[in-house]
Amino acid sequence: MSVYVSAELRRRIRAHFHDHCAYCLTPEALTVVIFEFEHILPRSLGGATSFENLCLSCPTCNRHKSDRTFGAGDEQTRMTALFHPHRDAWNDHFSWSEDATELIGLTPSGKATIDTLRMNRPQLIRVRRLWVAMGEHPPDLQ
């Protein structure tokens, strides 16, 4: 079920995340899809439709995240909290591979988020390679 997000709230979220996916940093302008407003703490778990609980997400990250807030940790038996786009600094949890095509998890949360959201799927690595060649990747959001 869709929930109403006001135009002003959508504008604030887009500006805050620079029209990039809050998780994989894919820029919406380089895709052919419209990004979504994702509830970080899902509504099904009591998450509010508020600035602090919404982020911009590419459809694929949003679908893989679904209603999850935890992912498999390093030992595959321990659950680890996923990256929270408002509370966590992206650079503390992720970095780019030397060729900037793959995400590297720097923390258990970063690793769990990469695995859960499938942020290094082959298709995305391939398109990142093209974006690097075009001079469009990695994004400089600092």
Image (cartoon, grey):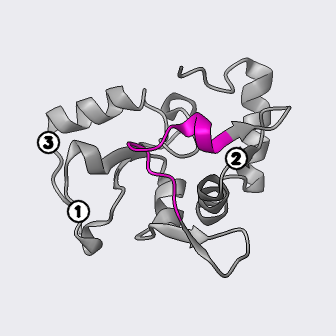
Name the residue located 72 percent from the left edge and 56 percent from the top edge. 121
Name the side, left or right, on which 61 lies relative to 54. Answer: right
Of mark 1 and mark 2, the one earlier in the sequence is: 1
Residue count near mark 1 (Cα–Cα under 10 Å), binned few <14, some 14–19, many ≥20: few
Name the side, left or right, on which 50 lies relative to 102. Answer: left
Check disc 3 and report the residue beneath it: 6
At label 3, the amino acid type is Ser
Image quarter of residue 99: top right
At label 1, the amino acid type is Ser
> Cα distance, mark 1 to mark 3?
13 Å
Of the 4 image quadrants, the one containing the N terminus is bottom left
Foreground label between 2 and 3: 2
Say above or below: 139 vs 44. Answer: above
Residue count near mark 3 (Cα–Cα under 10 Å), binned few <14, some 14–19, many ≥20: few
**Residue 68's mark?**
none
Name the residue located 16 percent from the left edge and 32 percent from the top edge. 8
Dot 1: what SS? loop
Q: Which residues are magenta?
A: 81-94
Say above or below: 130 vs 40. Answer: above
Magenta stretch contains residue 90: yes
Magenta stretch contains residue 100: no
Image quarter of residue 17: top left
**Residue 2's mark?**
1
Q: Position of residue 108 (x, y in %)?
A: 65, 59
Check disc 2 and report the residue beneath it: 106
Say above or below: 78 vs 20. Answer: below
Dot 3: what SS? loop
Name the side, left or right, on which 38 lies relative to 79. Answer: left
Q: Position of residue 92 (x, y in %)?
A: 60, 39
At label 2, the amino acid type is Leu
